Image: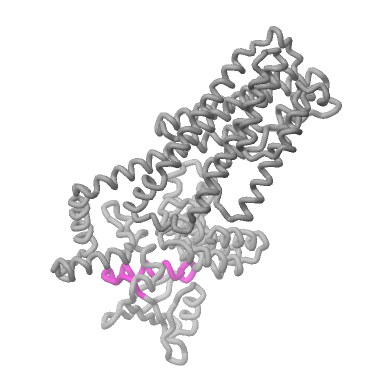
Amino acid sequence: MSREAKEEGNRLFQDKDYESAILKYQKAIKLLPKFHIDVSYLRSNIAECYIQMGITEYPKAIIECSLSLQISHKHNKALLKRARCYEALENYDLAEVDVCQVLQMEPRNVMALELYERVKKGKCRNADGSTRNVKLVYGEEIRWAQISTTNCNILKLREIISEKFPKSKAIHVKYKDQEGDLVTITTNQELNWAETGGEGDQASIKLYIVEVNPDQDPLYYQLTKTECKKHENCAVKEPTSIDDWIIQFAQIFKNYVGLNSDTYLDIHKLGMKLYSEAMEESVADEEAQSLFNTAAEKFQEMAALALFNWGNVHMSRAKKRLYITEDASKETVVLKVSAAYELARSEYLQAGDRYEESLKIKPDFYEAVLALGQQQFEQAKLSWYYAVGNNANLETWPSSEALELYNNAEGNMEKGMQMWETYEESKPSKVKLGMQKMGLDRIFKDLSEDETLEQSSNMRSQINLLWGTMLYERSIMEFKLELPVWQECLEVAVEKFELAGASETDIHLIMKNHCSNESAVEGMSFNIDEIVQAWNEMYEAKRWESGVRSFRLEPVLRRRVSKLCHDLEYV
């Protein structure tokens, strides 16, 4: 939701609707934790809106930049924006501090170098400005000060007050208007009003200084940092935030352990100390060891799943289609075909590597075993179609590599199916027990027994469908190579299709379009891919209708067929 609000704010900013953009950015900030890194960038965006609205809004832009830098101290864009505002308001000292900080991190930052030169020139121009007397009233103390009539602004005034009253912290500066009311000065324009219409004569003005909470003074942390930058040994204290859980934790110890935490100044430090001791005692307990085993299994599964998904990415990249124009020359076609084949082959190999790495981490990860089988199948199929597309002599074509890939693929399909069946048998006890130990069993309460059985049935159908497709494609290749085992391979493929739930009509159509059928269309234009795609779409509709959630392996088993093999067939 925060990201959507931010994007809407960006769109409004592009349309130059800066006020509306600010509202969207502020909404995005409210949806995030107080010190989330994105808050820093959103504050910087708000500052840019104020800058675009004109120089009268520059003080607000400075405040937003300061709030941004409280979260991300090295946010160069916020530093440069604040420096630009300081420069425009002729506060060259503060502008120089911000620009120098950027140049320390990025010595070749062109914008910062240009701004630095302008700030230097501005300081030279205002070196001999006229001054005006100011009477500063802080409690019972009254002190005189002088401010420049050419380049003084509220930030410069705050620096002067800090010099005159070193013990002052977070404050508000006020003046009495003509009606005798105390008015807080928050902008440079209000400072100008105080100079012209405030209490005092033409030669001097009277300003009142009132202590406030630091959260009420947006310039407090900024001025503290600026002052510290002038002294090498000064340590800046950042604003701290105590979460609710820390207070609750301290309260528990106070009420139940008998510890009076109110007698200590640093509740946070004491609470964390006792929390650490309690944790050390807890992890050594016997009951915790089984939880550690469960946690280790989950992290192992997470690592394996990451590599599994990485392999899926390579499998998807291998699906890149071959585009050839009608007027392309033969040489161009050959080059494009070769390049597309090498790219797809490389992606398949990398996918296989990722799946094997996944299995090294978790040897019983049946999803990776089945995915590896599909990778080997698609690589063998691609090799075969590339040979046919290039009019290779099938009698001398090295078919051993493709046959070995098919053998490995079938072996992995069988192994993966056995591992999955073993997992299904143990799932009700093993998985549920592990979830109960972690208090997560409530997550699976919404999946009924009937839905679990249907999900398992869908999984079995998808595996058999892939297995049958693999055997069907192999029978095509073996028939073309005149290997006598093609018919046995085709019969097993039909058995797998029947287990997958294919209808008699679909199986009859598949058999009719097999290249061994004399009535089939000449060449290799069988419709197995189209039929499989239709089955997948029907399955998708059924799943949405029943509301049964998909399983993790489904994107692999239901991956759309590659168009490259089809292109190679007709090249």
Q: Is residue 309 above or below residue 565?
A: below
- Front residue of 295/319: it is 295
Q: Is residue 231 left or right of residue 407?
A: left
Tell me the quarter of the image containing the N terminus: bottom right
Q: Position of residue 59 (x, y in %)?
A: 49, 68
> Residue 132: x percent and y percent?
42, 74
Camera sees residue 127: no
Is 185 within the magenta? Answer: no
* Above-or-below relation of 20 to 326: below
Residue 121 vertical placement versus 301 (above, below): below
| Residue at x 64% of width, y 13% of height | 399
Q: Is residue 153 magenta?
A: yes
Q: Position of residue 128 (x, y in %)?
A: 45, 63
Q: Which residues are magenta?
A: 149-171
Left or right, 120 with respect to 517, comes to left
- Return the residue found at the far right: 327
Q: Which residue lies at the image location 45% right of the left edge and 46% below the top edge?
A: 103
Q: How many marks?
A: 0
Foreground residue, 311 or 408?
408
| x 43%, y 62%: residue | 67
Quarter of the C terminus within the rendering: top right
Q: Residue at x 81, y 21 (%)?
A: 518
- Measured from the top left, where is residue 416 in percent x and y? 49, 32
